[in-house]
Image: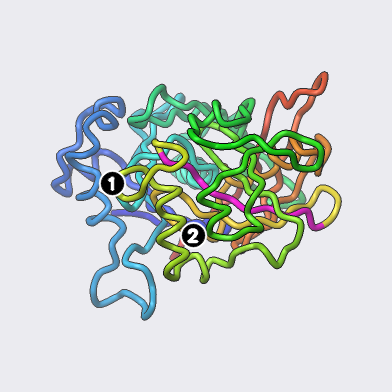
Amino acid sequence: MTQFYDARGNIYGVISPIELREAGIDLPASATKCASSRQSWSEAAIKLCCDWPEDQRPANSKSHRSDGLLIGPFQTSAPFDVLIVNTDGTLAERSGNGLTIFSQALTEQGLMPEAGGLLRVHHDKGEVVETSVKPADVEGVQGFWLDLGKPGFGPDAVAAQTVQGIEFNARDVSHVQPLAQLDPDWAHSQFVRIGNPHCVTLLGDAAALPSNEEMRESPLNEGLTQIAYATPAGAGDPCPAGVNLQWAVLESPQRILARVFERGEGPTASSGTSASAVASAAWRVGWVAAGEVQVVMPGGTAPIWLEEADGALLRVRLFGTAQLMG
């Protein structure tokens, strides 16, 4: 029923609305109604599709076999509606790796047009988020370019509250007190909205990057959860709706090392929108120039393409590829 795909270590299950209904999940007919009523069905869908069967769960693994669930398509031709369900039952506005996986699933179903198509993510936090997708070959690898549009910067872009302005690399950034309390090196952050909200903490030394193992352990896990997650799971501080957290350090020209802690998920091997936010933040503080930027995460390297004009970042594109898991 549920098919699982891997994109740079990010794993999502994919299932159609019809299959969910046939399995007993009371899912509304349209993606819009699904999003507005998600509290009535999302946790049951995650339990059905993403929880490990008790006799198959590997030792020391988390309770879910994937980082989330993609429900769609709701149509047989573009544009395609989709829901991105986090394993805590909340809905995401955008996931670069998730939409790459969904594009691959559409391709295997014979639905993705050769010229690409439009994906529309429905959620319960505002307007539908659209992403155009184009099949592509990059250095012999078949995948997709996702057009993520124009990013927004600063506290207002992510509705951050009670943050202090500060200077980093002669550029204006933010001081997020809860992050700095966890680690004094985490004192300079750049907020980015690229369909969903991100807080990229800028570091001068790779040794200050947290490992995924460290972020899963107490008390760091609890502290990051309070920052990243909205209430009641977290404190929503400084962003009441929650925020995805990243840490970044410039390794070499146009190449950045990054770590990710997602709202609704926690530490992840990789994230496409997080990689895009990291590249955008790096451009904002003068670390990188427009053009291709490589963002290196534990799960793999994400090629990001930044388009600039007249000193403004106009468009961010993400290249991704995904494979069906056996």
Q: Earlier in the sequence, mark 2 or mark 1?
A: 1
Q: Nearer the viewer, residue 65 or 108?
A: 65
Residue occupying the point 31% across, 58% down: 50
Which residues make up the magenta segment? 242-251
Residue 220, how many percent across, how many down? 47, 64
Q: Nearer the viewer, residue 28 or 243?
A: 243
Q: Amino acid at mark 1?
A: Pro
- Please, what is the dominant secondary structure of the magenta stretch? strand
Q: Amino acid at mark 2?
A: Pro
Residue occupying the point 71% across, 54% down: 203
- Residue found farthest to the right: 253
Residue 154, how many percent across, how many down? 61, 30
Cβ–Cβ under 8 Å for marks 2 and 1: no
Q: Give the quadrant of the C terminus.
A: bottom left
Residue 231, how many percent across, how many down? 31, 43
Tell me if I can see residue 276 in this picture. Answer: no
Label 1 element class: loop
**Mark 2 vs mark 1: in front:** 1
* Residue at the spot of label 2: 267
CA–CA distance in space, label 2 to label 1: 19 Å
Q: Which mark is residue 79?
A: none
Q: Is residue 123 above or below residue 49?
A: above
Residue 185, how many percent across, how many down? 66, 58
- Quadrant of res 126: top left
Q: How is the image coloured?
A: rainbow
Residue occupying the point 76% across, 45% down: 293
Residue occupying the point 63% across, 39% down: 174
Say few, some or many: other residues with alpha carbon within 10 Å of mark 2 (under 14 / 14 to 19 / 20 or more): many
Q: Is residue 204 left or right of residue 216?
A: right
* Residue at the spot of label 1: 232
